[in-house]
Image: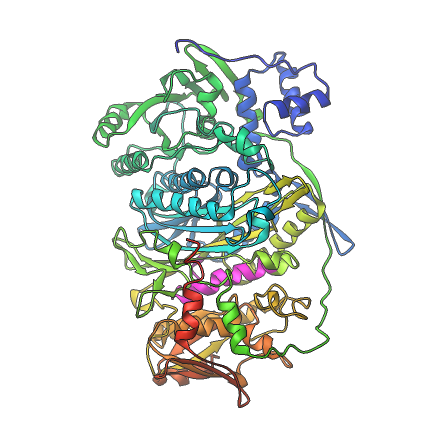
């Protein structure tokens, strides 16, 4: 194509309704207020916009890119009392981190300023982690959506600082139940959860394995609410020399694009992800899904890292949502500059100007360099067999000027482009009262109850999925996702070694969407605690942990749903503050609801907290599997009353209407620090967090190591007065760890506040009693198959 192809869009004389209709017809996902603000820009400039400019503004202002709901002014009513939240991000995330960093000035090196946040690993190196969602694309194209979801977050790491090296990945999925009947799905063209699961897992598998990056940690949740809107979180950790974190674009810099070619895949991806799904989405929005090529990205990654090593990179970012529009728009935000679309290599010759600029075709990086370094970059590109073009030049004009074959197709002041109108929203939440069961729960057999829980989709082994991934490539995975005598026992997270450092990195994640349905504030607190608890259990220094927040929710225009988000964010901030655990990155995904023939179906407010902690010595690494016969088994933390949101509540009538179990952050942090001192002394043989399914499930999972049985008495277990047997065995109180201790260290453990509740035995049985009464008595080999084989027939 030898000329620009673009259109002028008349809008200066349209009324508000006509503007909104234009937004819908062009699939801009811009509101009435947004379109009025766009109209004002062009009324002031005395001209009409081009279609390129409209697409650029829509992408830049999209919820996906601008996070406008987290920046909104929200009038929130909690239990009838009104308050004003002056920005969720500013109030509960940035301010929390800034306050924490005052007391940890040398730990967080960068937060919320780059593609990922950095914390100090040692004197020379920093570690970063980024987690993204790819929900909407994965709903309509599970393989491609998840494939490019992981590819995109790997590029986020390559675009962090002047180029971090991707060293490990995590993935977290939320699906509908795999055993649901097709006729129970109340909408046409919705892919069955089994098809979604298989496609998503294989998409992530193929990208990560082919890139040579180990997938070391993750989680899967199943719930009816995720049938229409699956959630697909993909994350990657990176390592970078501290000297290469700072970056800047200056006038005179060239912007070069390297990697894949630009095509018609991924068109309007940012705006597509900022709207609800409908029965028409599967047909109408196919072009919003990108097509991945991990081998192309591997070449681009090696090129970027080689260029960084040679000191040739001044700034780098990935070409993700919004394509060149987003990458060049962000890089030229301070300076302005000219973009030359005709220089971009294309997959096909018939792309219009707006398509070249906003296409989200994968495997592309945009790099700012000194003009004198162009020949050196071209030489490296030839070595690594990656295509390179000169895309733009920063010029200090403060305008984003896009040319196509010499014709100006976009000319916007950078301030106008990046100043989207602030939203004002309303939220409401009413605390649900706790209702105590009138009749105590006494099933015929607590052992049978345990067996039921072990077979529940929330608890069963994820081994069929884990085995799809190479979790040992690069040779640095110290604590693997599965362990034990047979290599099939669950772990709380993973630990990786870092080349050239004595420090290691632990990675973990946590989410509890069932809690969010009734108590989002406590869910926010509990999820932060669970992630922290898992990292500490594996040997991380509790004072050297950083976390990420990833929010997904349905319709933010619903006052109740937005109210749940506000409460969840408050709870998360409270626990992060108490633990002095800074946020260094995050992401949000809204409009995860589907309009069925019977009305909209929304996901519950879902918070994923993922985190990374510094393990200061390889000797400190602690696994979650029982290691030997003759150990003492201790518990850290106190059980509270309440079974709301628990797994057992799904199966036992009369419970689950009470409160979810509360906990005290101050006590928990003090306990984690005492535990860490025991880790440094070598007193801890293994440790496993008590999470979903409670104490009995955690004990069973420890015993699945195949090394020993367990004999436990709950008489002395730290617990609130008057707990029921169900609460003792299956309550999910946060802040608790099961700990295996060498007998010679029992005295030190008890001095640190751990309470001995039993020991490991040669007989491979799980035996739990209370005040001399047997509660659970079963051979481990009768329990393990129920847990181990739960997903086998589905995957």
Residue 361 spot, x, y in % from top left:
41, 29
Give the total of numbered labels: 0
Locate residue 661 relative to residue 290 in the image: left or right: right
Residue 444 spot, x, y in % from top left:
59, 79
Residue 558 spot, x, y in % from top left:
70, 44
- Residue closest to the eye, 411 or 460: 460
Residue lying at 48% horizontally and 27% vertically, measured from the top left: 267
Residue 603 appears in the rendering: yes
Q: Residue furthest right?
A: 80
How would you classify the magenta stretch by its main secondary structure?
helix
Locate residue 249 relative to residue 276 in the image: left or right: left
- Residue closest to the eye, 227 or 497: 227
Which color scheme did the rendering employ for the protein? rainbow
Does the magenta portion include 697? Answer: no
* Residues shaded magenta: 523-545
- The N terminus lies in quadrant: top left
Does the magenta portion include 537? Answer: yes
Residue 115 spot, x, y in % from top left:
44, 40
The answer to whether 299 is drawn above or below residue 794 in the figure is above
Residue 101 appears in the rendering: no
Residue lying at 55% horizontally and 80% vertically, measured from the top left: 718
The answer to whether 485 is drawn above or below residue 608 in the figure is below
- Residue closest to the eye, 244 or 13: 13
Residue lying at 26% horizontally and 39% vertically, measured from the top left: 309
Locate residue 599 relative to residue 477 in the image: left or right: right
The answer to whether 199 is drawn above or below residue 496 in the figure is above
- Residue closest to the eye, 690 or 142: 142
């Amino acid at each position: 194509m030898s000329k620009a192809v673009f259109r002028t869009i008349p809008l200066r004389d349209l009324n508000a309704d006509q503007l909104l209709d234009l937004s819908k017809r062009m699939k801009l996902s811009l509101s009435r207020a947004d379109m009025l603000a766009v109209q004002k820009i062009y009324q002031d400039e005395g001209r009409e916009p081009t279609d390129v400019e409209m697409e650029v503004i829509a992408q830049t202002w999209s919820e996906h890119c601008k996070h406008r709901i987290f920046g909104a002014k929200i009038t929130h009513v909690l239990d009838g009392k009104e308050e004003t939240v002056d920005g969720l991000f500013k109030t509960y995330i940035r301010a929390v981190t800034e306050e924490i960093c005052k007391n940890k000035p040398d730990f967080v090196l960068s937060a919320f300023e780059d593609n990922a946040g950095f914390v100090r690993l040692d004197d020379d190196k920093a570690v970063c982690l980024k987690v993204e969602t790819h929900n909407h694309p994965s709903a309509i194209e599970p393989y491609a959506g998840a494939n490019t979801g992981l590819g995109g977050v790997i590029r986020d790491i390559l675009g962090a600082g002047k180029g971090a090296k991707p060293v490990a990945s995590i993935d977290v999925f939320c699906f509908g139940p795999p055993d649901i009947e097709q006729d129970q799905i109340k909408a046409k063209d919705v892919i069955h959860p089994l098809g979604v699961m298989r496609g998503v897992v294989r998409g992530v598998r193929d990208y990560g394995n082919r890139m040579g990056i180990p997938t070391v940690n993750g989680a899967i949740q199943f719930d009816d609410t995720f049938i229409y809107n699956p959630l697909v979180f993909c994350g990657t950790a990176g390592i970078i020399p501290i000297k290469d974190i700072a970056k800047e674009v200056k006038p005179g810099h060239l912007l070069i694009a390297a990697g894949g070619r630009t095509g018609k895949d991924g068109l309007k991806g940012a705006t597509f992800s900022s709207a609800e799904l409908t029965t028409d989405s599967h047909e109408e929005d196919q072009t919003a899904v990108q097509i991945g090529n991990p081998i192309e990205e591997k070449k681009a990654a090696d090129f970027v890292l080689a260029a960084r090593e040679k000191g040739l990179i001044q700034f780098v970012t990935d070409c993700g949502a919004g394509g060149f529009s987003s990458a060049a728009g962000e890089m030229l935000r301070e300076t302005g500059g000219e973009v030359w679309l005709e220089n971009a290599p294309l997959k096909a010759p018939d792309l219009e100007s707006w398509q070249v600029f906003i296409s989200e075709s994968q495997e592309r990086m945009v790099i700012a360099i000194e003009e004198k370094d162009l020949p050196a970059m071209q030489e490296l590109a030839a070595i690594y067999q990656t295509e390179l073009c000169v895309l733009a030049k920063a010029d200090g004009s403060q305008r984003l000027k896009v040319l196509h074959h010499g014709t100006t197709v976009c000319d916007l002041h950078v301030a106008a482009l990046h100043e989207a109108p602030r939203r004002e929203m309303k939220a409401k939440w009413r605390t649900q009262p706790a209702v105590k069961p009138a009749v105590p729960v006494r099933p015929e057999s607590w052992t049978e109850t345990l067996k039921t829980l072990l077979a529940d989709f929330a608890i069963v082994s994820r081994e069929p999925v884990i085995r799809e991934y190479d979790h040992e490539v690069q040779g640095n995975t110290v604590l693997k996702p599965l362990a034990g005598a047979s290599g099939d026992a669950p772990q709380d997270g993973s630990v990786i070694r870092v080349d050239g450092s004595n420090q290691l990195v632990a990675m973990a994640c946590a989410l509890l969407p069932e809690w969010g349905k009734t108590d989002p504030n406590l869910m926010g607190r509990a999820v932060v605690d669970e992630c922290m608890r898992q990292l500490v259990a594996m040997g991380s220094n509790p004072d050297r942990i950083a976390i990420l927040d990833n929010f997904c929710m349905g319709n933010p225009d619903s006052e109740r749903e937005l109210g749940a988000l506000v409460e969840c964010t408050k709870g998360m901030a409270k626990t992060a503050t108490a633990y002095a655990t800074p946020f260094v990155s995050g992401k949000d995904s809204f409009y995860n609801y589907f309009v069925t023939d019977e009305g909209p179906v929304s996901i519950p407010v879902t918070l994923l907290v993922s985190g990374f902690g510094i393990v200061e010595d390889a000797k400190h690494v602690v696994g979650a599997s029982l290691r030997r016969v003759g150990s003492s088994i201790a518990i850290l933390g106190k059980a509270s009353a309440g079974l709301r949101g628990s797994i057992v509540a799904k199966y036992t009538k009369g419970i689950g209407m009470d409160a979810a179990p509360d906990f005290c952050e101050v006590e928990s942090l003090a306990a984690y620090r005492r535990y860490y001192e025991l880790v440094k002394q070598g007193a801890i043989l293994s440790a496993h967090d008590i999470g979903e399914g409670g104490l009995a499930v955690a004990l069973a999972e420890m015993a699945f190591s195949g090394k020993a049985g367990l004999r436990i008495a709950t008489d002395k277990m730290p617990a609130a007065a008057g707990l029921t047997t169900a609460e003792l065995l299956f309550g999910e109180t946060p802040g608790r760890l099961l700990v295996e201790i060498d007998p010679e260290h029992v005295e030190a453990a008890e001095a640190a506040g751990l309470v001995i509740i039993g020991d490991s035995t040669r007989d491979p049985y799980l035996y739990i009693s209370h005040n001399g009464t047997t509660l659970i008595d079963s051979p481990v080999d009768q329990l393990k198959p129920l847990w181990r084989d739960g997903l086998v027939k589905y995957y």
